[in-house]
Amino acid sequence: MKQDKIFEKRKKFILELLGDPLYKPMRLREIASLLRLEKQEKKDLYAILECLIEERKVKIDTRGRYSIMSGKTAGHTKDTQSIKEGIFIGHPKGFGFVEVEGEEEDIFIPEEDTGTAVHHDRVLVRIHGEAKEGKRREGVITKILERGMTEVVGTYQFNRDYGFVISDNPKFSKDVFIPRKESKGVRDGDKVVVTITDYGSKNKSPEGKVKENLGSCRAPGTDILAIVKSFNIPTEFPERVLNQAMRVPDHVLEADFDGRMDLRNLQIVTIDGEDAKDLDDAISLTKENGIYHLGVHIADVSNYVQGGSALDREALKRGTSVYLADRVIPMLPERLSNGICSLNQGQDRLTLSCLMDIDEQGNVISHKIAETVICVDERMSYTDVKNILEDTDPAAKERYAKLVPMFFLMKELSALLRSSRHNRGSIDFDFPESKIILNGAGRAVDVKPYESNVATRIIEDFMLLANETVAKEYCRGEYPFVYRTHENPDPDKVESLLTLIRNQGIQVQKAHEEITPKEIQTILESIEGLPNEPLISRLALRTMKQARYTTECSGHFGLAAKYYCHFTSPIRRYPDLQIHRIIRDNLRGRLEREGKTEHYREILDEVARQSSVCERRADDAERESDKLKKAEYMSYHLGEEFEGIISGVTGWGFYVELPNTVEGLVHVNSMRDDYYTFDQDTYELRGDLTKKVYRLGQKIRVRVEDADPVMKTIDFVIADDYA
């Protein structure tokens, strides 16, 4: 009986393997090799496959390759087929998926049915029948409506009379043929940008011509430059933009003081990272009669970048500054971002200030938004302020003795504001970010977690309050504006999260149809310190929607804020620059008098859309840059062992995150001790024979098996004493 049960479990495992979209038809020996089976186990595999063929669940073709008996093979009538329009998402192995707007499930496209579609093409797909339980719908590409990629970034491979470019984006799975006359003399191993001239056919590779040579793939910085180019991020400013920047004065002109509040008598500091050069926020703080007087002073970039100018159009095109492992690609030319717009110590600077009076419960009882001029007393670093407040650096405390009382007052107010936000339900996901250390050749020599501290929290709390205060005034005044919106999570995702939490034995009280931030906060607090805290925290984060820019003031779910905008970083974010312009026009009475209200209503939807698109692009590029450098760093540590935490579990294995934030995959094929089944309800991999269980949040020791900077992947195996 026991043997029969094991046989049935193994049949189920093989059936799931052959039905997986990633599986391509293989012969018996290839399947055995994939599963790393011994000689006797191969005989067992053959018996399982023969049994599945008899049950008409698996078929074998004339070349001895096994595949699942799909609905498509059995045949369908035209009545069960439908045509959909969507975006093709490629896969390195040649097949792909079509994402249809408004539909949660995508459509699987086998390699032989992709036609000439490549990653990001808009296509028509014909669906074969209905989706079976646990399986995606399957289809065939019938027409290319619009090409999504006209250029490819990759590595050139020379071949006597011609060449090929292998795309850096693994989702663009086809090599691009380059005729010799279109190669521009690039050398073997060079990184290039290629324009596609012909998308090929089923039996013919796409063809292209070299547009730009980025240099040898071994040269410092070429790897990151390739990522920049692949995301089409502008790196050079047009000459007209640079000329306009050169005409901006490098100091505040006397005429610019007119109509501004002079705050140069206030004690004001900037607090930033040690290597920051574009300083766009400064702080002043005093307290009298139980009332805190907080000033958040933001660089008035709008005084130097006029709406509709070449500078402004370029800033909107970029949308945001991009912060990569080895470089910053600024939204504005450095003459502005690091010069006249940066709140540099000891220099008069033009600002927009949000001046707030706050009571001892953390409530803003009055405020004023004003055009101001300031002069920063000290350019402080997070490290120095942290050390002063934690009393770990007597030298820093002595050097900044005049400012020490203000820093302690900042700490006091910060704690008050954080407590106030917490009481209303603001959710705090405190996962560390990465800091990647590069050597002179641009190689990653260390990766460290970059966690928040008392100084970073002070700035975060003050900026959040200013953003809320500004948004509240302009929303209530019904002015045209750009808000930072974070929508409520999808109810189905929330229900899945709550089901999983209950499966973990945790009681959940949910009072409303839609979950509130306070309820999520309560759940996270109830599991604090428990072994399953990392599991639930990560899953809760994954239920959240992405924040975006809108012209509607619909609130910020994660912050439990009714009003929210981005006001505090106009040097590096376009929405902040745009709302500064609106605020100045309002303060000077130009919104109504000069008809600017209608002008802003006409342009702001596009500003919000473009800013959201550019933000996603920057986030994706930053993520790819970090993945590349982390893989490069781990390639120097092959064979070494580390302890980490399981950060993700899937049907093909589980991901492990190390204390330094590096994440890698333990593939199920490397776990040869058993057949493992993925439980979607509990996010666990369970061994059929050994009964071993691998779950989110579990500590585990792993060994570095492989690290590929080109593919940006890291592979771990379970260390021997954990196997």
Image (spheres, rainbow, N blue to C red):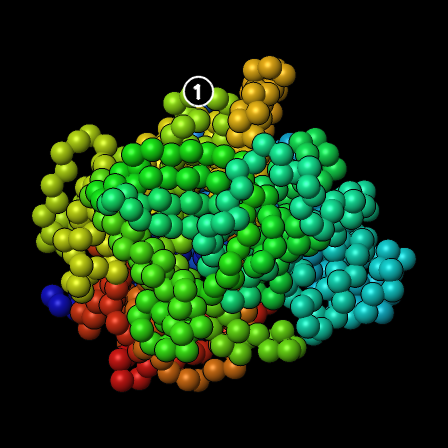
- Quadrant where the image shows the C terminus: bottom left
Name the residue: 63% across, 16% down: 594
Q: Quadrant of residue 692?
A: bottom left
Name the residue: 46% across, 50% down: 266
Q: Is residue 226 above or below residue 337?
A: below
**Where does residue 582 sit, x and y in percent of width and height?**
55, 28
- Quadrant where the image shows the N terminus: bottom left
Left or right? Give the position of 2 relative to 290: left
Element on which disc 1 rests: loop
- Residue 92 seen in the figure: no
- Residue 673 seen in the figure: yes
In front here: 315 or 103?
Answer: 315
Q: Residues within 10 Å of mark 1 (few under 14, many from 20)?
A: few
**Where does residue 447 sit, x and y in percent of width and height?**
47, 73
Residue type beneath disc 1:
Glu
Left or right? Give the position of 431 relative to 276: left
Left or right? Give the position of 51 relative to 143: left
In front here: 245 or 703?
Answer: 245
**Where does residue 32 sit, x and y in percent of width and height?**
41, 71
Left or right? Give the position of 238 relative to 272: right
Q: Quadrant of residue 410?
A: bottom left
In front here: 250 or 672?
Answer: 250
Name the residue: 19% across, 30% down: 513
**Where does residue 72 sit, x and y in percent of width and height?**
45, 40
Q: Residue furthest right?
A: 181
Q: Is residue 618 above or below residue 469?
A: below
Name the residue: 68% across, 72% down: 220
The residue that mark 1 highlights is: 478
Q: Is residue 601 above or below residue 488?
A: above
In front here: 128 or 705?
Answer: 705
